[in-house]
């Protein structure tokens, strides 16, 4: 029987960026946007606050776009400071490159295993689904879900008792499956 686990965001990830006011490198989005229309051109930013000193920085979302080419519902969501939109914007790799930022997902996700009933079985088959592109180490996910230490998980992999079509040693941000035989 296949068990489904899910890696789920619990809050917005932190934004890694150097603060110009202090030495901190972590900012937090509070879901607020700023939109500025100048004649027919429109700029929009996602506001982020330094976690140490509270200084505000702006991340470019739209840059000198023709107002007519921007979807009205997107503008509405920015004017409403839609927190879901902040999550979507941060997930966009083009936006991250443009603003030279990376995301820090530590403590911003949890693992749902649907209970521990399946863990006692001799063979467990698990599909791990990602609700957002959260870079995590499969070893960490498996350790947490199975209630094992990472060293124990690594030993199971080395012994061939834990197998997967993906490389379990690196980082992933998408769905994967694994099978554990004890
Ligand atoms: Zn700061």
Image (cartoon, rainbow, N blue to C red):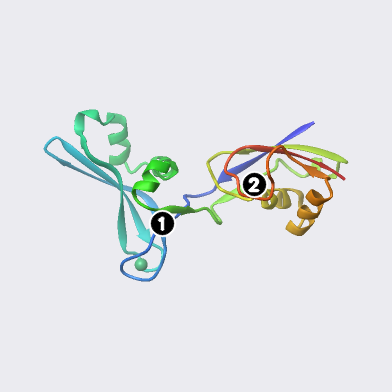
Instruction: Give the quadrant of the C terminus.
Output: top right
Q: Earlier in the sequence, mark 1 or mark 2?
A: 1
Tag count: 2
Q: In which quadrant of the rendered view does residue 22 lie?
A: bottom left
Which quarter of the frame holds ligand 1?
A: bottom left
Q: CA distance from mark 1 to mark 2?
A: 22 Å
Q: Residue at x 29, y 35 (%)?
A: 76
Q: Residue at x 71, y 37 (%)?
A: 165
Give neighbour class at mark 1: few <14, some 14-19, many 20+ (Cα, 10 Å). many
Beta carbon of the mark 2 residue lies under 8 A of ligand 1: no
The picture places residue 54, in percent across and down from the top left corner, at 35, 64
The one of 177 and 118 positioned closer to us in this rendering: 177
Left or right of 35, for residue 17:
right
Secondary structure type for disc 1: strand
Left or right of 110, for residue 127:
right
The picture places residue 163, in percent across and down from the top left corner, at 77, 41
Residue at numbered disc 1:
28
Q: Residue at x 57, y 43 (%)?
A: 173
Secondary structure type for disc 2: strand
Left or right of 158, for residue 74:
left
- Judged from this view, the residue extending furthest toward the bottom is 22
Residue at numbered disc 2:
111
Q: In which quadrant of the rendered view does residue 166 lie?
A: top right
Depicted 55 relative to depicted 129: above or below: below
Left or right of 124, for residue 54:
left
């Amino acid at each position: 029987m296949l068990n489904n686990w899910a890696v789920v965001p619990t809050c917005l990830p932190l934004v890694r960026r150097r603060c110009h006011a202090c030495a901190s490198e972590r900012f937090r989005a509070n879901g607020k946007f700023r939109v500025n229309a100048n004649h027919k051109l429109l700029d929009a930013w996602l506001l982020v606050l330094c976690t140490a000193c509270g200084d505000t920085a702006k991340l470019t979302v739209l840059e000198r776009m023709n107002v007519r080419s921007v979807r009205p519902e997107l503008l509405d969501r920015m004017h409403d400071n839609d927190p879901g939109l902040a999550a979507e914007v941060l997930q966009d790799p083009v936006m991250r490159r443009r603003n030279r930022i990376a995301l820090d997902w530590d403590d911003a996700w949890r693992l749902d295993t649907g209970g521990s009933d399946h863990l006692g079985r001799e063979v467990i088959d698990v599909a791990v689904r990602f609700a957002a592109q959260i870079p995590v180490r499969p070893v960490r996910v498996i350790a947490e879900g199975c209630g094992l230490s990472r060293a124990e998980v690594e030993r199971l992999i080395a012994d061939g008792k834990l197998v997967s079509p993906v490389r379990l040693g690196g980082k992933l941000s998408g769905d994967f499956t694994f099978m554990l035989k004890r």
